[in-house]
């Protein structure tokens, strides 16, 4: 049975939970392989809304084992707050498994994240201030703290002491902040140690054995393609690999075990935070998309920047990820708009670019080249087959499919778990 990678094709917030729900009970494991609590998934089940920040969306499927992979950075207080919130609503969270190799967000990482952003001023990246970037930096600098370290206090103290030798100098001498003590860090990190212990496992081994046994594993990205630290709109990106390649390094599953790559493309485009956004609408239409689509960050609550669909980005996501299937979400948000625009290319200083410009400078100066399509007025939330969609909605999907060069296998027509049209089986060629 396959390993399936699920990625966002834009700047995030595309609604990846839709594809997870579509696969439903056919998936045995859902693995979050990158990021931390700096992104969120909103899933609506029978009218109940669940906002997940750190946990894989598979935790809401009773037949599924949710896994936090080694590529994730874990804020333990957020983890247990989320678990307690779900438990209080009757969700069984006892199946959760966490990699012993996942890195832990220490309190000094959160502090440094916030003060650094303030220090950058107008040059800020737009981080969530949750310590994600500094934790990944510690990982690369080989001074990070892993989940497994929490169970050996001698090693934990030694690692915290080593990290604080430099970080306290930075906090005190550059940012005029008080030094952080080893004891307060160790106390916070070990607060949930006993509750955490039964969840921790060698998840790479676990997932390899699951695939050998014929189980289906879904690898779920946090953030999205254009926020990938290597392939995104750097430096306005996250600190990890949110593309399909990151699924391997973040889970311990080798590339030859992956059969399908499913990319989620919102029917229009949004992003949160700083950075270039060629199709951004700063007018009434942008506000209409924001209000109609409920475009406010699941994790931060920040209003999302909204714009027309950009298929240049879609083609780029197709190429970088090796996409086998696209899922278009929030098509219903476009109902009631007389003329819809799709960005088919960019103009950069008089030169047409049909693909993503090579340099950050060119992308900053890109202006969209649009094609217009007629809209539709009908409420499409009750449609369950492609043929039930208004003709102009069908044409919109078919045009996008042609322009990105890959099939659209499913279409989201509302926020509910069942408000989706399936055109092709995501597990089959």
Image (cartoon, grey):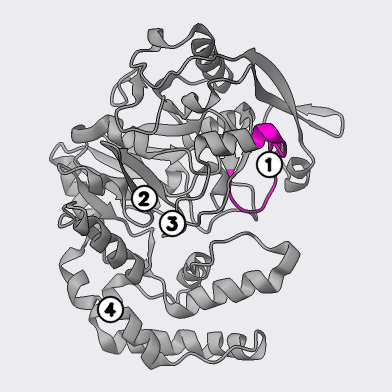
Numbered mark located on residue 277 in the image: 1
**In this rendering, would 324 be left or right of 115?**
left
User: Residue beneath label 4, please?
Assistant: 150
At x 42% / y 51%, what residue is drawn? 40
Please, is residue 87 above or below residue 413 in the view? Answer: below
Place of residue 412 in the rendered image (x, y in percent of width and height, measured from the top left): 41, 27
Please, is residue 337 above or below residue 57 in the view? Answer: above
How packed mark 4 is, by other alpha carbons closer than 10 Å (few <14, some 14-19, many 20 or more), is many
Separation of disc 2 and disc 1 at Cα? 26 Å
Furthest-left residue in this view: 213
At x 48% / y 73%, what residue is drawn? 138
Place of residue 90 in the rendered image (x, y in percent of width and height, measured from the top left): 17, 52
The part of the image, by quadrant, that contains residue 104 is bottom left
N-term-proximal mark, 2 vs 4: 2
N-term-proximal mark, 2 vs 1: 2
Separation of disc 3 and disc 4 at Cα? 20 Å
User: Residue beneath label 3, please?
Assistant: 35
- Front in this rendered view, residue 40 or 407: 40
> Magenta residues: mostly which secondary structure?
loop
Place of residue 257 in the rendered image (x, y in percent of width and height, measured from the top left): 29, 39
Query: Does 111 lie within the magenta span?
Result: no
How packed mark 3 is, by other alpha carbons closer than 10 Å (few <14, some 14-19, many 20 or more), is many
Q: Secondary structure at mark 4?
A: helix
Disc 3 and disc 4 in contact, CB within 8 angstroms: no
Which quadrant of the rendered structure holds the N terminus? top left
Which range is magenta? 271-286
At x 25% / y 76%, what residue is drawn? 192
Separation of disc 2 and disc 4 at Cα? 28 Å
Separation of disc 4 and disc 1 at Cα? 41 Å
Separation of disc 3 and disc 2 at Cα? 16 Å
User: Residue beneath label 2, please?
Assistant: 51
């Amino acid at each position: 049975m396959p390993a399936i990678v699920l990625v966002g094709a834009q700047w995030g917030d595309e609604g990846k939970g839709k594809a997870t729900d579509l696969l439903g009970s056919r998936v045995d494991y859902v693995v979050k392989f990158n990021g931390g609590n700096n992104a969120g998934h909103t899933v609506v089940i029978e009218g109940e809304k669940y906002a997940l920040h750190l946990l894989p969306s598979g935790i809401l499927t009773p037949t599924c084992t949710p896994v936090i992979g080694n590529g994730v950075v874990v804020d333990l207080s957020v983890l247990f707050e989320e678990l307690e919130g779900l438990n209080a609503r009757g969700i069984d969270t006892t199946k959760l498994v966490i990699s012993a190799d996942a890195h832990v967000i220490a309190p000094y990482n959160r502090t440094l994240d916030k003060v650094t952003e303030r220090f950058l001023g107008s040059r800020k990246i737009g981080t969530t201030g949750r310590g994600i970037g500094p934790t990944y930096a510690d990982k690369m600098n080989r001074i990070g703290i892993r989940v497994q370290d929490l169970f050996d206090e001698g090693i934990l103290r030694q690692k915290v002491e080593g990290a604080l030798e430099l970080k306290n100098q930075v906090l005190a001498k550059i940012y005029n902040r008080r030094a952080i003590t080893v004891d307060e860090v160790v106390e916070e990190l070990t607060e949930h140690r006993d509750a955490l212990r039964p969840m921790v496992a060698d998840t790479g081994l676990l997932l390899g054995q699951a695939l050998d046994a014929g189980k289906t594993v879904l690898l779920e990205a946090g953030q999205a393609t254009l926020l990938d630290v290597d392939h995104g709109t750097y430096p306005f990106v996250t600190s990890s690999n949110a593309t399909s390649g990151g699924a391997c390094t973040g889970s311990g599953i080798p590339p030859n075990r992956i059969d399908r790559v499913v990319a989620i493309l919102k029917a229009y485009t949004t992003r949160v935070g700083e950075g270039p956004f060629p199709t951004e609408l700063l007018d009434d239409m942008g506000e209409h998309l924001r209000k109609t689509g409920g475009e406010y960050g699941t994790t931060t609550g920040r209003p999302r920047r909204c714009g027309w669909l950009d298929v240049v980005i879609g083609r780029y996501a197709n190429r970088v990820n090796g996409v086998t299937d696209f899922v278009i979400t929030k098509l219903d948000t476009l109902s009631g708009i007389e003329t819809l625009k799709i960005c088919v290319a960019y103009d950069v200083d008089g030169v047409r670019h049909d693909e993503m410009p090579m340099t950050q400078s060119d992308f900053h100066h890109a202006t969209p080249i649009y094609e217009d399509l007629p809209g539709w007025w009908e409420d499409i939330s009750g449609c369950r087959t492609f043929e039930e969609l208004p003709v102009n909605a069908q044409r919109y999907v078919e045009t996008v499919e042609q322009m990105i060069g890959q099939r659209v296998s499913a279409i989201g027509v509302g926020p509910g778990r069942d408000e989706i049209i399936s055109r092709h089986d995501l597990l089959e060629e």
